[in-house]
Amino acid sequence: MHVVRFADAPAYTAPGHFDMSMVRLQGREAGPSDDLWMGVSVIAPGGGTTLSASPQEKMYVVLDGQLEVSNGATEVSLGKWDSCRIAGGENRRLANRTSMPSVVLLVMPLPADERP
């Protein structure tokens, strides 16, 4: 068993992310994982990401607030407890267009070269 207290979760940054604070809950620098990692992002009003893709799929769950998710062709609004899967290679842009923070759980597989 590997426990990470939220207060001790390591912060990280990612290119193309703005007005966001991000921590890893499990995996990578937060501890061992064979297949995936999890993080939480707090997206400030007006914050989000640029439109970009990665080879790994991404799964998002909105824990609080509202989040706009776009793949460049379609945009959806997600509220508390709503989730969204972005396929590997699919574009995605996140945007908080409200006056309150959005809190989002992210789950992603580790790239093949990071797996044991």
Image (cartoon, grey):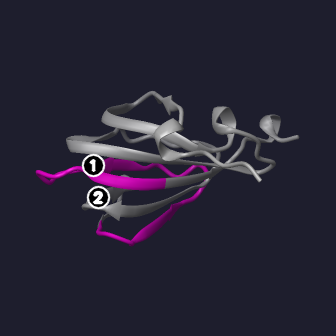
Disc 2 residue type? Leu
Q: Is residue 12 above or below residue 116?
A: above
User: Regarding mark 2 in the picture, which secondary structure is present there?
Assistant: strand
- Residue ID at (37%, 63%): 63
- The single residue placed furthest to the right in the displayed view is 116
Picture coordinates of residue 91, whole percent (x, y): 46, 49
Q: Marks 1 and 2: in contact by CB < 8 Å?
A: yes
Distance CA(mark 2)–CA(mark 1): 6 Å
Q: How many marks?
A: 2
Disc 1 residue type? Ala
Q: Magenta stretch containing residue 102, yes or no? A: yes
Picture coordinates of residue 42, whole percent (x, y): 33, 45
Q: Earlier in the sequence, mark 2 or mark 1?
A: 2
Locate residue 61 relative to residue 49 in the image: left or right: right
* Residue named by callout 1: 95
Q: Which residues are magenta?
A: 78-105
- Residue ID at (61%, 51%): 108
- Residue ID at (45%, 40%): 52
